[in-house]
Image (cartoon, rainbow, N blue to C red):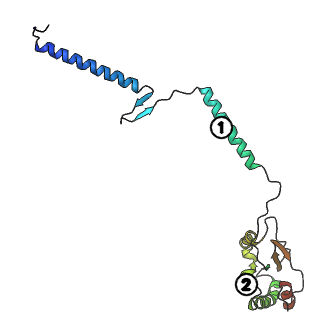
Amino acid sequence: MPGKKTSKGSKRNNTNTKKNKKAAKTQKNKTKSTKGKKKSRRGVKTVVRQPMAISTLHDKLMDHLQQLRSRKQVREQPSIEPIVKPANRTERPILVLFHADWCGHCHRLMPQWNEMKGHLLSNNTYTPDEIKEIESADQEDKMREIKENFMNENEHVQMDGYPTMGKIADGKFEKYNGDRDTSSLIRWAGGEK
């Protein structure tokens, strides 16, 4: 009714109704666009996933565990050939003397051993690192070092007593059972005298 005047209160009600309808429409549109999405406190939208059926989840976990077990079994199968740790090989063998400070035989051998050692070092036949002297008190630690660095994994040093002399060549220990004079020791070591 064009000529009819309305009171201020009714105009406000009419405006409020329009605003309410518009807000409701906007809210409805927001609800449509965020279906399956959830708004967090910070305004970041996250996808809400439907819960997976427990039986499906159980099946997937069991399949995954079976795959892990089969991989582990493949790794744990022993190889056909024994693993031989490669020793630190040098062109010359490593000369080794096992001795004890309390041993009389060792005391009698030391002058000849030292002469042989001096001859081999002065002629550059051997280096100091290639001639090892292991005292009984240090034997356990030094033996572990020698085995790790110079011997094959499945090899052992055979000792019957002190003194014990030998060469480590190609990762194996060869015990010396020859004469104990200086010339014999030098020939044994490969120093030719």
Q: Is residue 135 visible?
A: yes
SS for dot 1: helix
Q: Which residue is mark 1?
A: 64
Q: Give the position of the C terminus as an image quadrant.
A: bottom right
In this view, 124 is above or below 170:
below
Q: Is residue 162 visible?
A: no
Q: Quadrant of residue 7?
A: top left
- Residue in the foreground of this view, choosing between 1 and 10: 1
Pointers 2 and 1 in contact (C-beta within 8 Å): no
What residue is rendered at 80% in x and 89% in y? 116
Q: Residue furthest front?
A: 2
Task: Specify which label sits upstream in the sequence, 2 or 1.
Answer: 1
- Residue in the foreground of this view, choosing between 82 and 164: 82
Tell me the kind of residue under disc 1: His
- Residue in the foreground of this view, choosing between 53 and 103: 53
Q: Give the position of the N terminus as an image quadrant.
A: top left
Q: Nearer the viewer, mark 2 or mark 1?
A: 1
- Give the numbered dot on residue 127: 2
The crowd level at tag 2 (other Cα within 10 Å; few <14, some 14-19, many 20+) is some
x then y, percent, for residue 159: 84, 73
Q: Is residue 35 toward the left or the right of residue 172 in the image? A: left
x then y, percent, for residue 111: 79, 90
Q: Is residue 134 toward the left or the right of residue 31 in the image? A: right
Tell me the kind of residue under disc 2: Thr
